[in-house]
Image (cartoon, grey):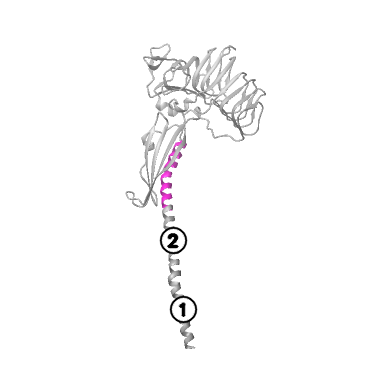
Amino acid sequence: MKRLILNDRGMAMVTALIIMLFVIPLVGTFLTRAINEHEANVKDRQIKTARVLANNVLVDFMRQFSQDHYDGHYDSTSLARCEAFYSVGYSTVSIEADTNRHTVFLRALGKYGQDSSNPKFTKKITGLIQFISDLTRFGSMINGAFTITGSNVIYTGGMYTNGAMTISGSNVTFNGGAVISNGNHTGSGTTTHNADVYYLGSCSGGTYNGARYSYVPDVDWPTINTTYYSQRYHYRTTANQTWNFSVVGGSGTFNVVGTTTVVTIPASGAILFTENNNLTVYGTVRGRVIIVCSGTLGSTTQGCITVSGNLRYANGTNLASAQDSLALMAKNRITFTAPNIVVNGIYFVEQAGTTQLQGTSSGTGSFSLYGVRCSGLSSYYSSALFQYDPNLVQFPPPGLPEKPFLVMWRVEG
């Protein structure tokens, strides 16, 4: 019996030794691995937090820019940011604003830790925000349902209608861009769509050589912010005037017809503001120019622009450039009175549902618009061409309402 007890004790000692030699190291290994994984998870979470702190900067700027399509996009006061403290760290940002290219480049730094000068982890995010006006995205924009009654009309660069689009004219062709109908899209038998078509409701009629999508991309119909223009104009008048644009000594100018007043357009561009009156324009435009004609809605004596002859860029290409671009923004109406006319730029009438671009009453001649028209044309021309100008995105005139688009987002480090 005594020998059996001694043997049992020996077996227990051997078992304990085996546990010490194998099990305890194995447990230690598991514990070490668990500790390392926990530390790695904590480190990863802290790095992600630093990235979130940096990303918050871009979100904040996009929020700010989306609230105001006119103001505060490039000036240092609205772009300034102090180092921001959060419960777990800090964020800082450096900014490069380019008013010519309509971009803001951001370098945001997220710092995890209580000590801003000695953080545990940092993450840098670079982003490029480009401002693009809806007034430069399409060849034609209509604020409401629209019927195309003209025949032998060619649209290029896309078309947007904030309602149903119906084509009753013959031989209407859409070349390129996106054709968007915020409602039903109904073509005639001779309508040709050499473009993708977006619609809500139904889509029928004509030939479709592009894709068809039953949804509509987001588009905002702009409004004329008269307060903005009244505070930033290069030239302003409250009287009815006629302006003849020309190039003098390489610089862009316009002469107020019937007077000795000659206004030079600065290299940085010009906002020309006519307040509560009507305006007539024609000539050759050198420079980046926006003409804004305000007035009481529905009036015929205010907020109306007449284009009495060709209104073209000095570069002779019918395309906007770093030197030449143009926009006409009228509260009530834009009228073309020349029987054969070529115009460049953006032609925007704010209340397109009740007022519109109008042609001549001669019933002859042609009409060619290279740029963007933002209202229906009551055309008496025998033929019309609407040619979208894609250069307006890169070289817009000053003072257009514009929206922020995040075109580049990159995590560094």
Residue shown at the point (43%, 20%) measured from the top left: 238
Instruction: Judge whether 88 appears above or below 202 on screen.
Output: below
Compare residues 114 and 260 and report the one nearer the observer. 114
Residue that carries the numbered disc 1 in the rendered image = 12
Q: Quadrant of the C terminus?
A: top left
Q: Is residue 361 left or right of residue 231?
A: right
Magenta range is 45-67
In this picture, residue 412 sits left or right of residue 188? left
Q: Is residue 128 magenta?
A: no
| Marker disc for residue 33 | 2
Residue 15 appears in the figure: yes
Badge 1 local density, few (<14 within 10 Å), some, or many (20+)? few
Figure check: 347 above or below 215: above
Residue 269 percent across, percent down from the top left: 40, 23
Q: Compared to 147, does 72 lie above or below?
A: below
The residue lying toward the viewer, choosing from 411 and 19, is 19
- What kind of residue is marked 1? Ala
